[in-house]
Image (cartoon, helix red, strand yellow):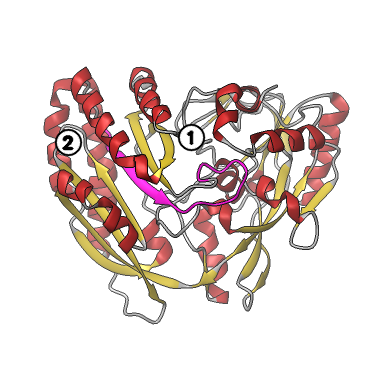
Amino acid sequence: MTRPGAEWQNWARSARVRPQRVEFPGSTAAVQRAVTAAAARGIPVKAVGAGHSFTGIAVAPGVLLDLSDLTGLVSADAAAGRVTLRAGTRLHQIPALLAPYGLAMPNLGDIDRQSLAGAISTGTHGTGARFGGIATQVTGAKLVTADGELLVVEADQNAELLPAVALGLGALGILVEVTLQCVPAFLLHAVERPEDLDEALDGLDERVAASDHFEFYWFPHTDRAMTKTNTRLPESAVRRPLPRVRTWVDDVVVGNALHQVACSVARTVPPTVPAISRASVRLWGDREFTDVSHRVFATERSVRFREMEYALPVEDVRPAFDALRTLISDRGWRISFPVEVRFAAADDLWLSTAHGRASAYIAVHRYWREDPTEYFAAVEQIMLAHGGRPHWGKMHMLDAALLSDRYPRFGDFVALRDRLDPERMFSNRYLDRVLGA
């Protein structure tokens, strides 16, 4: 289906565009036809998933390919644990598709609204020192290149391209199918509780090493950390899920409705932020339950925000976090959104933020109606001083000249882009900035 371009905007309302044309391909052949037609007219083309990136990575001024109809399971090999999915499939749809085969994705982030293609292409990740980002689960892919041809990347065909294609920023072609290495379905035992911030920081290395999945949040203007520790259990273990009423109160009433009110009040009356943050610490967390993995990993988020996140060498997380605390105190800012700290294993994907090093992630947020520029710019300088690499789908101010020194395979990726898309059919202003025109 094709329609004239109406204005598109991302979830965070930080990027918008009015494309020349919007198409809804429901098959690989339809994507190939769309790319071929756009190339013949000299019009750039971009695929869009759920619009959950905070940057302009998915902005499509020419032809916007909405992948909402390119979803579902293509094939599954339960014995090998491998499944092939269409690229527009949303992460929250995948558990039901895997359930008949007794499989699950090894790790997920705390939001599952993204499309599969968008999540892997921007480096979306969860937490866990022994687990990589979602793109590390990719064992094969099919994408439509600038000439409308289908490029197959798998173990016995173009395998050398997988480290680039699995996390390709949408710069190499339009992903149409993705093959994932899954694991047997499992449960997570979740312990979420408030702790003294300094005590949590002092024992951070040991806590991360001993946990399957560990992360913490810090509300500025408080001395408390909201810790989350998830332990993997076999599917046969006893489930003890949260009661539905408790889930509704915690995630919908407190996590979204009250947080929305708090952000609105804080924006109008900034001096109230410290008191609101202290109240939030008392209301959030302090619960323990066991449930299927995807129900523990992901939570519902309806309060819009803007986010910047940097990956650091894991040994730099404490000094960078301490510098961030000092910055907020010294500047006298009133920050109503928590700072999030997560962890990931090293990997070999060319543009992964965890390429070649065990990594810690520090994420900062602002309510979407507040200007994040001053805060994000100052935090970014701290992250850069500690070897940081910005998340591709979250706000940052770096360009190709600065990024190229932070990725050993950056030049290889650009060379592959030159080969697969010499006319820049799949480019936009963001990609021109971070990869070069």
In the image, 396 versus 251, the foreground residue is 396
Residue at 74% in and 52% down:
160
Quick check: can you spot residue 90? no
Q: Residue furthest right?
A: 40
Q: Is residue 380 above or below residue 140?
A: above
Mark 1 or 2: in front is 1
Q: Secondary structure at mark 1?
A: strand
x, y (%) of residue 45? Answer: 73, 31
Tell me the kind of residue under disc 1: Arg
Residue at 20% in and 60% down:
287
370 within the magenta span: no
Span of residues in magenta: 336-354
x, y (%) of residue 53? Answer: 51, 36
Residue 277 image label: 2
**Which residue lies under the disc numbered 1?**
389
339 within the magenta span: yes
Q: Are marks 1 and 2 in contact (CB under 8 Å)?
A: no
